Image (cartoon, rainbow, N blue to C red):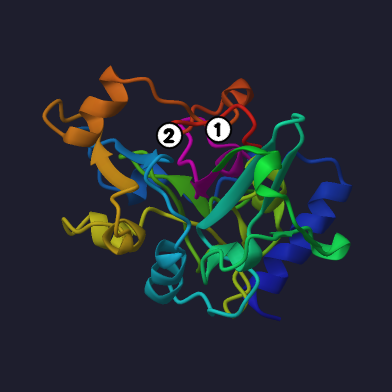
Amino acid sequence: MKRRDFLKNSLVFISGAGVSMSALEWLDPKAVLASRPEVRWAFLVDTHKCVGCGFCVKACKIENDIPLQANVTRTWVERYVIKKDGDVVMDSPKGALNGFTSNKIDQNKSGMLEVADEEIAQAFFVPKLCNQCENPPCVQVCPVGATYQAADGVVLVDRKWCIGCGYCIMGCPYGVRFFHPKEKVAEKCNFCYHRITQGKKTACVQACPFSARKIGNLRDPKDPVAQVILNQRVGVLRDEYGTKPHVFYIGLNKEVR
């Protein structure tokens, strides 16, 4: 029996016996991670600049070995159309891997919806990714410590420890997690941790032709991203959840789900 199967079966047994999953702390992130109190990574999205080209989605998939045609993605772009009657429709075909090539809104099983130009009050694009929450529910529910938060705020997944139980996927209120189609473990955006810790930009930031995506260090008062986040009007997704997201938006509309 493989280690992953053993752990998974063991957890099922333990769950049935009524033992708290949180009691199983097999990995202490503090013992593994180097402390970097001088850094707190944060992401800034300017919805006014996003044109929905999808370059960021494709760059992310290539960089992080997510199959291009797989119906999962670490980051994606949503299109919102607000009609004059107040109705809101949105879509994100293939996560916007190939951008938005049609004016029709993909309503999945309901087919393609065409909205006449004269009916549109507002239309815009919203990139989404893991929010790297200050209080990440995914970390709290992971029974084996495979999902953990680094000292610089980024939530990471240790593929060697993940048993594929799926609790973190269910626990994320933003729906950013999924099973990696090849690795069969939990997967999500990690701000391209292998790049930012080497002084590079994330793949999506580098690929964006209009600088709609930026990453910075909140602890550095001279960081241009930190200056915007700390001094300008920015919003986060679902602030009411209390998770304290660290993906900030310029021009975030209240209709965004």
Looking at the picture, does residue 79 appear above or below residue 100?
A: above
Instruction: Using the image as rendered, state which of residue 131 and residue 85 is in the foreground.
Output: 85
Q: Which residue is mark 2?
A: 249
Q: Are marks 2 and 1 in contact (CB under 8 Å)?
A: yes
Quarter of the image for the C terminus: give it.
top right
Q: Is residue 139 magenta?
A: yes
Left-right relation of 93 to 68 = right
- Mark 2, secondary structure of its residue: strand
Magenta-drawn stretch contains 105 = no
Which of the two residues, 27 or 90, is positioned nearer the viewer here? 90
> Where's residue 46, x and y in %?
38, 39
Q: Which mark is residue 237?
A: 1
Image depth: mark 2 or mark 1 in front: 2
Between 68 and 87, which is closer to the camera in this rendering? 87
Decide: is 75 above or below 229: below
Residue extending furthest front?
A: 118
